Image (cartoon, rainbow, N blue to C red):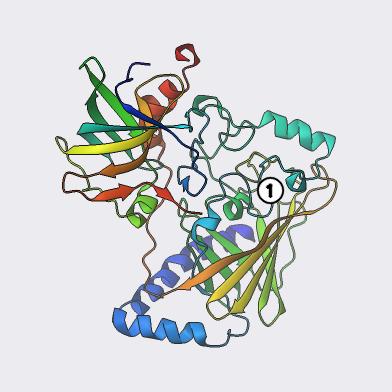
Amino acid sequence: MRNRLLTIFLGFLMVSVPLFAHHGAAAYDTSKKITVKATVTEWFWANPHCFLRFDAKDDKGNVVHWATEASNPSDMVNLGWSKQTFKPGDEITVTFTPVKNGQPIGRIQQVVLANGQTLSARVVL
Amino acid sequence: MFRFSLASTIALVPMLMLASLVRAQTAPSQQAGAVKDQKAAPAPRHDISGIWDPGNGGIQPLGPQAMPEDGKPEHRVPYTPLGLEALDAHKPSNGIRSVLPAETNDPVVYCDPQGFPREDLYELRTTQILQTPQKVVLLYQFNKIWRVVWTDGREFPKDPEPRWFGYSVGKWANDYTFVVQTWGTDERTWIDRAGRPHSGDLRVEERFHRADHGTLELTVTIDDPKMYTKPWVALDRLRFELQPPNYDVREMICSPSEFAEYNKLIGTPASDKDRQ
């Protein structure tokens, strides 16, 4: 896998579940979480899913262009996110679930902003 | 008759929403206190109006609250052979039969209307209920859908042209329970996120029970002899909490153009099996 340097945690997420009901989880390796320091390139506030694009370096120092999805704006607002949460160039630490096929695509779990604020993208049902 | 009904309803909804907005001009602090007092008050008779929130329990990504498709035997709905065949043709992107995003044929993923009863059984979010002497109007957050439930004593049409949301009539079973019957639904819709099917013979019963002033409970029963050998309960007293009258319900709309952008960037490459 192209991002071995990224921190990978194995975990079983029984307490909380993602809000992303619209497209399901079949494409994702839900046993994995990746945490990486990144630079925001785009924050797209959209229905049915917001998505965040960012750049992060892999283990060889190459920049990888990631695309990660979040939930719909209504849910994200309830979790403390907004259309103004990110702008291009923001430095963040993002945790996400990767897809199974190795593409640089993921589903956001959590973001830590440059000011230290943590935003979760998950909800307890 | 129904052309007139539809037109009158379209005209009515903005007027009712305007009336609601006028009420919302009351100072928020006064409203918060009033709502607290209201919740402690006895339930009003023959009244389910208000802004109701089912919380996250209404999302129902694996299928309806009382019957999720999670592989447990007790959640196996009683399919007929035709029902099983129809189920097999539906490819959901959630649950134990889930497929990759690019392979699903769930109409809602492509921003088609959810239809009824799926409006109750998937992405059931904040719901505003308005009452007039002739009808009860339900305004749903997800996709900004509205339904009309006639309470003027009319009968169902004899041979209804199918509608995404069917035809609904309602009656008060007692002072606190409003019962809605719906049929004439469009066969193209799925009953739930899991892809359970229905035929044009589907009949749905909704029981809205005002448990107390601040609590509404919804029970939904599915009856479709072509697809199921017996009726089954999809929602069992799903709980809604009354919200303040000035509660601002946010937009939640499936946008086809934004979905296309999502698919281009995430859905399609995430489904690329050649990369696996």
Q: Observer-nearest residue: A40 or A94?
A: A94
Q: Chain of mark 1?
A: B
Residue B26 can be seen, yes or no = no
Q: Amino acid at mark 1?
A: Glu
B58 lies above or below B218: above
Which residue is painted at 78% across and 37% down in the image?
B83
Q: Please identify the quarter of the rendering in which residue B195 is found.
A: top right
**Within 10 Å of the Cα at label 1, are there few (<14), some (14-19), or many (20+) other Cα atoms?**
few
Which residue is painted at 52% across and 62% down in the image?
B54
Percent across and percent down for residue B3 are: 59, 57
Please state if A111 lies on the left or on the right of A75 as rendered: left
Residue B105 can be seen, yes or no = yes
Q: Which residue is mark 1?
A: B161
Please state if B69 lies on the left or on the right of A33 as rendered: right
Count of numbered labels shown in the rendering: 1
Which residue is painted at 20% across and 17% down in the image?
A61
Question: Helix or strand or loop: what does disc 1 sit on?
Answer: loop
B173 lies above or below A2: below
> Split into 4 quadrants, where in the image is the N terminus of chain B?
bottom right
Q: Observer-nearest residue: B123 or A2?
A: A2
Percent across and percent down for residue A95 are: 33, 37
B133 lies above or below B5: below
Q: Please identify the quarter of the rendering in which residue B120 is found.
A: bottom right
Percent across and percent down for residue B134 are: 61, 74
Which residue is painted at 54% across and 56% down in the image?
B58
Q: Please identify the quarter of the rendering in which residue A107 is found.
A: top left
Q: Observer-nearest residue: B255 or B269?
A: B269
Residue with the most extreme top position: B274
